[in-house]
């Protein structure tokens, strides 16, 4: 996944809503430097922070992840990615797993809606 693309989408959406990185950080209960690192592609947000950012910016996870998810089909080591994702899922708390489950349901519902159009 290209961290920079996700960060640019978050930054662009934040700026379009006239929200400073400091205000977004405050609303998500993190330091502004953390938001700047995400927007510059240095870091990825945690699942909880990603959900908080989506809520504050009123953006769907699908919108923020759409380009990254579309690029996975071009990766030759898909089995390695699959194993990496499974390892990460196994480390989630029950609450984080519930959030991920809701995100996935929302994502697949959106894909189903787009295919019908």
Image (cartoon, rainbow, N blue to C red):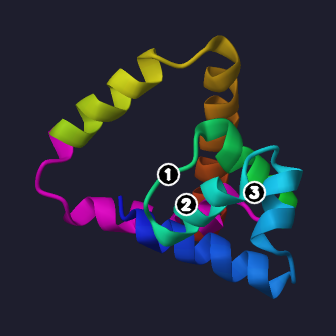
State left or right for residue 42 relative to residue 11: left
Residue for point 61% across, 39% down? 47
Q: Is residue 63 magenta?
A: yes
Q: Which span of residues is magenta-colored?
A: 58-79
Callout 2: 10 Å neighbours few (<14), some, many (20+)?
A: many
| Residue drawn where x is 46% and y is 16% of the image | 91
Q: Which residue is mark 2?
A: 38
| Residue that carries the numbered disc 3 in the rendered image | 54
Answer with the quarter of the image where residue 46 lies.
top right
User: Which picture quadrant has residue 20?
Assistant: bottom right
Image depth: mark 2 or mark 3 in front:
2
* Left or right of 85 on screen, residue 65: right
Q: Position of residue 29 (x, y in %)?
A: 82, 43
**Depth order, front residue of 117/8:** 8
Q: Judging from the image, what secondary structure is the residue with disc 1 in?
A: loop
Badge 3 crowding class, 10 Å Cα cut-off, few under 14, some 14 to 19, many 20 or more, is some
Image: 113 above or below 107: below
Q: Which residue is mark 1?
A: 44
Q: Position of residue 38 (x, y in %)?
A: 55, 60
Residue at 54% across, 61% down:
37
């Amino acid at each position: 996944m290209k961290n920079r693309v996700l960060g640019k989408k978050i930054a662009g959406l934040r700026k379009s809503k006239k929200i400073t990185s400091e205000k977004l950080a405050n609303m998500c209960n993190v330091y502004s430097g953390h938001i700047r690192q995400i927007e510059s592609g240095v870091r990825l947000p945690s699942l909880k922070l990603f959900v908080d950012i989506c809520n504050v910016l009123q953006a769907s996870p699908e919108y923020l992840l759409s380009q990254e998810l579309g690029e996975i089909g071009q990766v030759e080591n898909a089995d390695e990615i699959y194993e990496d994702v499974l390892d990460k899922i196994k480390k989630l708390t029950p609450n984080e797993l519930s959030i991920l489950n809701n995100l996935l349901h929302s994502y697949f519902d959106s894909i189903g809606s787009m295919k019908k159009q």
